[in-house]
Amino acid sequence: MKPFSDIPIGELLPQQPPFRFVDSLEEYTAELARIRFTPEEGKNLLMEDGCLSAAGLMEHMAQCSAVRVGYYNKFILKLPVKIGYIGQFRKLKITRLPKAGETLETTIYLKEEVYNITMVDAEVRIGDEVIATASLKSAVKDD
């Protein structure tokens, strides 16, 4: 198995720049995944006034959840990465928007997986500051 730093993030999810809102998978366990992302003006969509917009932050959390599922499918189950869909955002709390150049470290905590439905909690940090949290429900498309 490759070290996390050697895995091109494009192998784990279908989104491509400029609509990719993750840079690297830093950690994966059965219970969580930790992902990093640094938004940049001119490189990422959904930037407004030098900050990643609320919609961009939500898309980032959704893509982080997808990276966790993509890693699990590709490297644990040895299956192709599948297309997924966000079905629900709940308990979304954003205390501030990240500025261009600030590195987000997002942790996805697995709550439950039933068939092709995954429920996770997301926590977005910049350093020690929690800037956003949410609960997400997603589904993976059956072949």
Image (spheres, helix red, strand yellow):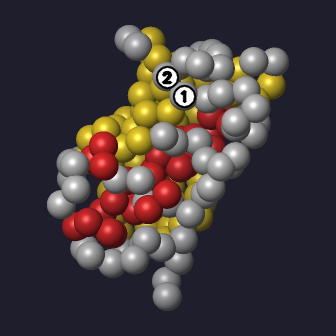
Relative to 24, say whether 98 is above or below: above
Pick out the residue farthest to the top. 128
Q: CA distance from mark 1 to mark 2?
A: 4 Å
| Picture disc at residue 56 | none
- Answer yes or no: is residue 121 visible: no
Three-letter amino acid code of the residue under disc 1? Thr
Q: Quadrant of residue 127?
A: top left
Three-letter amino acid code of the residue under disc 2? Thr
Pick out the residue farthest to the front. 6
| Picture disc at residue 38 | 1
Residue shown at 18% from the left, 60% from the top: 1
Relative to 111, say whether 61 is above or below: above
- Tell me the crowding category of disc 1: few under 14, some 14 to 19, or many 20 or more residues within 10 angstroms, Cα based: some
**131 relative position to 72: left or right:** right
Residue shown at 70% from the left, 37% from the top: 44
Q: Are marks 1 and 2 in contact (CB under 8 Å)?
A: yes
The picture places residue 40, in percent across and down from the top left corner, at 66, 27
| Picture disc at residue 103 | 2
**41 relative position to 7: left or right:** right
Residue shown at 42% from the left, 28% from the top: 105
Numbered circles on residues, count: 2
Residue shown at 41% from the left, 53% from the top: 8
The picture places residue 112, in percent across and down from the top left corner, at 33, 57
Q: Quadrant of residue 55?
A: top right
In the image, 131 versus 11, the foreground residue is 11
**120 relative position to 22: left or right:** left
Pick out the residue farthest to the bottom. 143
The picture places residue 65, in percent across and down from the top left corner, at 45, 50
The picture places residue 111, in percent across and down from the top left corner, at 33, 50
